[in-house]
Image (tube, rainbow, N blue to C red):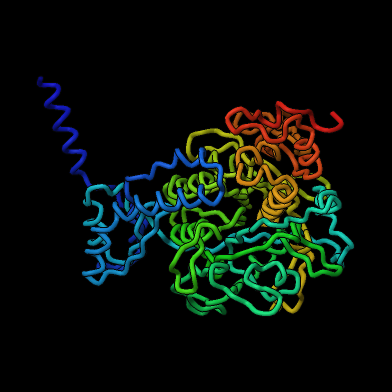
Amino acid sequence: MTSVLVLLAAARLAAASPAPVDPGIFRDRAAGERASFLVVFRDQADLSGASRIQDRTERRRFVFEALRARADESQAPVAARLARDGVKVRSHYLVNMLEVESDESTARTLAREPGVLAVASNRPAVLARVASPALDLRAAAAIEPNLTLIGAPDIWALGFTGQGVVVGIADTGVEWTHPALRSQYRGWDGAAASHAYNWHDAVHDADLNVCGSDSPEPCDDQGHGTSVAGLAVGDDGGENQIGVAPGARWIGCRNMHNGAGTPARYVECFEFFLAPTDADGANPRPELGADVVNNSWTCPEEEGCTDPEILSSAVQSLRAAGIAQSFAAGNSGPACSSLSNVPPIYEQAFAVGATDLGDGVAVFSARGPVLRDGSNRIKPDIMAPGVGVRSSAPSLSGNLYTPVFGGTSAASPHVAGGIALLWSALPYLAGRVDDTEELLEASAVPLTSGITCGGLSGGDVPNPIYGWGRLDLAAAHALATARVDPVPAPETRPSPRQVAPRPGS
């Protein structure tokens, strides 16, 4: 009996203990000075039923409604009280949290609220950009060599260019009027533009920024997002064939201000891609969501991602909704275990490293294994061209195309566009994220290294330098079409690795 009483007392004490408050939130702040922080709630929606829903629209709606209902239940009393007190607050549901701007006293008070898991940081930092090494400045090619390398033209030749697939671009924004991007923008019908449900700006507090705050139309405040979008879907209908899936449509969300992101901005854009909203940020419609989301960014500790799990539920929830995601591995190489930022460290995040056009690993490409969360998991998952590739550039740059865009930021949209291309060619795969990633892994060109990282040999496949190897869309399509039964039931469908060998093996 005594031991039971002790346990009960300990449980009551734990329940009464305040949630941890990230010490970095108010570092270098004067007493009473406000800062942006996140109040993360313990409650999580049960999304286990999503995988049993065959209709893709209904699956998305189920995930959206379950997340919203759980967040509303958890957050409503706290949010209402903060609003009454004049505290600036914004609700998020993909991660069950409130974005709050207030002082340290308020943060400490919120940490004592029942159901609060943590009070986390939400500090912006500057996007790490990579300058490509000096190269000959290429003019437009009939088809860019990076696209030929990954086999995209082989899929185009079959009549599939990404038709019917929507790619979400989460970045510094996109210059939607760019000649290689306008026709692919879902908000453009060839005569007029409608940005509702096609564009969202998660930057609400910009200063000295060409896009301002809450831009009502797609705008790129840095140029990064325009180049990323070009590699995914760009094509001007002439000699500038720069994108992997030129027949796909794109929608966009700005999650960085001059390259500076925060966990809240990243989550807000994820929410938009799950259930886009109208021009006022209202009336969400999951049926208009993205099919694939490209993420050419990472969230380092300097941006507030001091808790390595802060964005994990967002990534997992989009997967549950059948939305594929491609994540840049990061530009922190070449040291072993330099792949250390979220989201690419997550098991469920498809992390993309960068190679040059000769299939050599880019010196800046982050490497595994992942140590930050103690998992020692192999990352990146796959590689794609990311050194000196040609893509679109914003008009203010003085040149509509940049011949030297690089970084894992350039590699990731090759994969996002590649998924769009395969889903248009193999519609039974659409929404089956696990199967699609396994197919890309099984069909990748295996690449090895003499380097050993964390006790894991670079001579194995997968390995912590190249993952499963370099993206090969032609091989992926061939591997998928070699199946005896292309549409087995979800519960019995084998892994692509079990179905057929790599062509030529």
Q: Residue at x 62, y 51 (%)?
A: 328
* Position in image of residue 93 (x %, y %): 40, 55
Q: Quadrant of residue 396?
A: bottom right
Give the position of the N terminus as an image quadrant: top left
Q: Residue furthest top?
A: 1
Q: Residue furthest right?
A: 142
| Residue 334 in sight here | yes
Q: Nearer the viewer, residue 317 or 132?
A: 317
- Relative horizontal placement of residue 312, taking residue 428 as reference (left or right): left
- Relative horizontal placement of residue 296, taking residue 63 as reference (left or right): right
* Position in image of residue 114 (x %, y %): 22, 48
* Position in image of residue 221 (x %, y %): 59, 73
Q: Nearer the viewer, residue 502 or 428?
A: 428
* Position in image of residue 50 (x %, y %): 48, 42
Please count the marks in the image: 0
Q: Nearer the viewer, residue 125 or 503?
A: 503
Q: Nearer the viewer, residue 44 or 32?
A: 44
